[in-house]
Structure formats: C-alpha cells, structure tokens
Amino acid sequence: MNVSLQSLIDPLVALVREAGAAIEAVGHGALDTQRKVDDSPVTAADLAAHQVLVEGLPSIGSRDWPILSEESASIPWSERRGWSTYWLVDPLDGTKEFIRGSDQYSVNVALIDNNLPVLGVIGKPRTGEIWVGEPARGAWYQASDGGAWESLQVRSHSPLRLVVSRFHRGASTRRLIESLGNVEVEELGSSLKCCRVAEGLADLYPRFGPTSEWDTAAAQAVLEGAGGHLVDCHSWRALRYNAGDSLLNPAFVACASLDGVWRDVWPD
Ligand SMILES: Nc1ncnc2c1ncn2[C@@H]1O[C@H](COP(=O)(O)O)[C@@H](OP(=O)(O)O)[C@H]1O
Ligand SMILES: [Mg+2]
C-alpha cells in the first residue's frame, strides 16, 4: 500500500461525521425496522449511513480499494480473496441500541491491509465523539467537532473493570464474571466497548457470542493504537480479516494487557 495513512485521517473523520449526521437525520421515532437473514434489525438509518460511506470512500485513498459494508456484504469469497487493501465498514453498529433510544451506537470504518486493520475511525453520532487509531502510530480521541485531539493509552485497574454487551451476553460471560469474583462490570453497546478499553477506563471486553468482521475492525485499530489488543481467545493472536469465506469472528477479547490473572480462569 503506497499511501500515507496519516493523510487519510481528516477526510475519513469528516465522512464518519457525515454518516453520523445521516443517522441522526432519520431519528429514532417511528423507525421502520426490517430483519436481515441473521435476524438482526436494519433500519433506514443503517442504509442512510451506508450510502454516505460508499459514496464518500472512493475519493479517500485509492479508488481501487473495494468496500465491504455490513449492508452490502454478499460479495463472494471468490471475488474477495483477491483483495489486499479494502475498506471494511459497519455504518451503524448497535442497531438494537439505536432502536431502543440509547446513544450507544457507532459508525465504524476500517482500512484493512494484508488481513489486518491499519487505520480505524469510530464515531458516536449522538454526542459527536470520534476515536481514531493507527496501530503503528497511536490512537486519538476528539470530544466534538473542531475540539482538541487527545492521545489514548490503555491502563490496567484493580479490581478489574469489564465492559460487556447489554443485549448479547451469554453463559460464558456470566461464568467468567463469577470466576473473577471482585470485578466492576459496565454494560455498553456496539464498538464503544473497545473504545472504553482504549481510553484506559476498562481492562476487558470479553465476547463469546457471534460478531462479524465489520463489528471489530475499526475498534481493533483504535485499541492497538492505544497499546491494547483485540485477540482470538483460543490462539490469543490478533483477529485477522478476509481470510476465508466466513465473515464471522471467533470468540474474542479486547484487553488493555494480555498478562493478567483473568487468563487463568478463562472459560473454554
Ligand atoms: N447472531 C449474530 N450473528 C452475527 N452478529 C451478531 C449476532 N448477534 C449480534 N451480533 C452482532 O453484535 C452487534 C451488537 O453488539 P452489542 O450488543 O454488543 O452492541 C451487532 O451489530 P449491528 O448492530 O451492527 O448489527 C451484530 O453485528
Ligand atoms: Mg455491527
């Protein structure tokens, strides 16, 4: 890839803000909710943000980079297997949160190169917050448009602080919390859980239930840029992208550090 990633950040942040504005313009009232094949909800807001992103991304970076979005994910493996650099997008992560009127949904754009995220931008449309990560260089947070950028750094806490999904939490997460004993647990929607770890405000986000590659790519870039990890919790290696037909992630953990007592009680 023959492009300065740094030069992509400003236009990407502006585009993520625009996608967020499209979501807010649809609003939360009287949502026409449909069901996708995996029974997850999709709204006019998901589609509006998708439209903004697929129209805007080709003028950022290279026009040759394909786009894989949650809302246009049916590109066959026979075509995807030839991709080395591409945009991976979740236009509205946390649709269920959005439908229920919470502010815990996000716009996610990642640039993947050779199966790994090399740049990620996450926007929280309701508040205007933005998180940016470039694993090789750092991670940054902006509280609102035009505000100062703060550098992000992970931090460890005692007792451990966990962030977990509100709507998608299974028996393994419960077992882990029980085994750990004295922990603080916060419920949060969407990729904002990983942002919490990147900000140094939480240690762990365990995820045993299904997610797709667009749910984690931008978050992984932010987290790694802040010194943290997003790893498959069997191999303990960084999640990889577009490595096969399936776009589902394995069970994973987002964490500030890979060293910790929590590894000793990790459920099988
Ligand atoms: N059965 C399933 N298969 C694939 N992904 C699922 C899923 N159930 C939930 N998810 C993923 O979990 C995300 C929500 O996580 P959380 O509850 O932690 O906010 C959803 O994001 P979307 O809202 O973008 O569809 C969806 O991608
Ligand atoms: Mg999602």
Image (cartoon, rainbow, N blue to C red):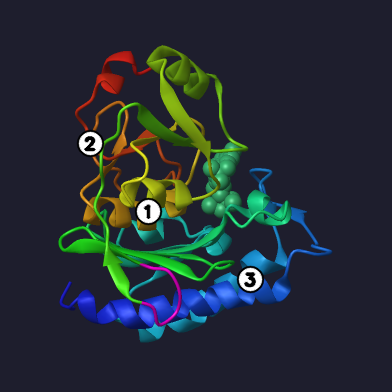
Q: Are marks 2 and 3 in contact (CB under 8 Å)?
A: no
- Can you say which quadrant of the picture contains the C terminus? top left
Q: Is residue 145 magenta?
A: yes
Counting residues from the start of the chain, the first of labels 1 and 2 encountered is 1
How many marks the image carries: the answer is 3
Residue 250 percent coordinates (x, y):
40, 35
3D distance between C-alphas at marks 1 and 3: 20 Å
Residue 237 percent coordinates (x, y):
23, 36
Q: Amino acid at mark 2?
A: Ser
Q: Amino acid at mark 1?
A: Ala
Q: Which mark is residue 219?
A: 1
Front residue of this view, candidates 33 and 103: 103
Q: Amino acid at mark 3?
A: Ile
Would you call the spot at circle 1 few (<14 residues within 10 Å), some (14-19), or many (20 or more)? many
Counting residues from the start of the chain, the first of labels 1 and 3 encountered is 3
Would you call the spot at circle 2 few (<14 residues within 10 Å), some (14-19), or many (20 or more)? some
**Over which residues does the magenta segment extend?**
142-147
Q: Which mark is residue 23?
A: 3
Which quarter holds ligand 1? top right
| Residue ID for mark 2 | 257
- Can you say which quadrant of the picture contains the N terminus? bottom left
Front residue of this view, candidates 78 and 247: 247
Residue 104, above or below 140: above
Residue 260, above or below 46: above
Q: Residue at x 31, y 47 (%)?
A: 200
Is residue 39 found left or right of 66 in the rendered image? right
Report if residue 64 is visible in the image: no
Element marked by disc 3: helix
Report if residue 206 is visible in the image: yes
Q: Are marks 1 and 2 in contact (CB under 8 Å)?
A: no
3D distance between C-alphas at marks 2 and 3: 34 Å
